[in-house]
Image: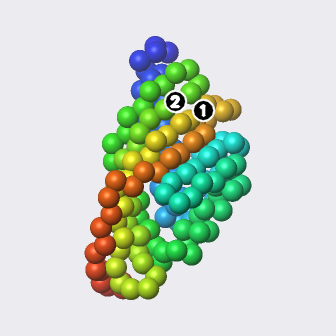
Amino acid sequence: MTDLVQQMIDRSLLRQTAELYAAGADRRDKQLWRPLLAEDCVIEGPGFASEGRENCLLSLDALGQMFRGTVHRIHQQVVAIDGDRATGETHCTADHLLRDRDAILIWTIRYQDMWRRDAGMWRFTRRRLIVDWTETRSVTVGIGA
């Protein structure tokens, strides 16, 4: 396999880690997150830091306690791959349905990411969440089937 083909495969797999991370956050699914996180993973952001896979998984519980629901959308991702390590930036918009009123808190996020290939899988070793700006918007909840 050529280096270019391997780079394309790795870039696709790194993006998939971000997309599965977002889906796991929205579903509060620890089993979806578990294989994405290295044992020594660190996740940090404004006012929080978690070290180690098991502690990072607990952040899903906190997310569920803070918000009625969330929707994370992954946008562009820029990565640099060096063998079995990669660094990059992943852009995301996250809607958080507030508990105390029918409104969403929207975060425009940049994740500063570090990955390591472990047992053939790309896993996050560090994920730093930077909130560039926020917006709060009223919503109507409960329309639909």
Which residue is located at x 29 percent, y 80 percent?
A: 139
Does residue 55 appear left or right of residue 79 in this picture? right
Q: Residue furthest top?
A: 2
Amino acid under disc 1: Arg
Q: CA distance from mark 1 to mark 2?
A: 6 Å
Amino acid under disc 2: Ala
**Looking at the image, is 104 positioned above or below residue 25?**
below
Q: Secondary structure at mark 2?
A: strand
Which residue is located at x 56 percent, y 20 percent?
A: 83
Which residue is located at x 55 percent, y 72 percent?
A: 64
Q: Which residue is mark 2?
A: 86
Q: Secondary structure at mark 1?
A: strand
Q: Which mark is residue 116?
A: 1
Query: At which x and y percent is residue 57?
Result: 65, 58
Q: What's the image's color scheme?
A: rainbow
Give the quarter of the figure containing the C terminus: bottom left
In the depicted view, which residue is nearer to us: 33 or 63? 63
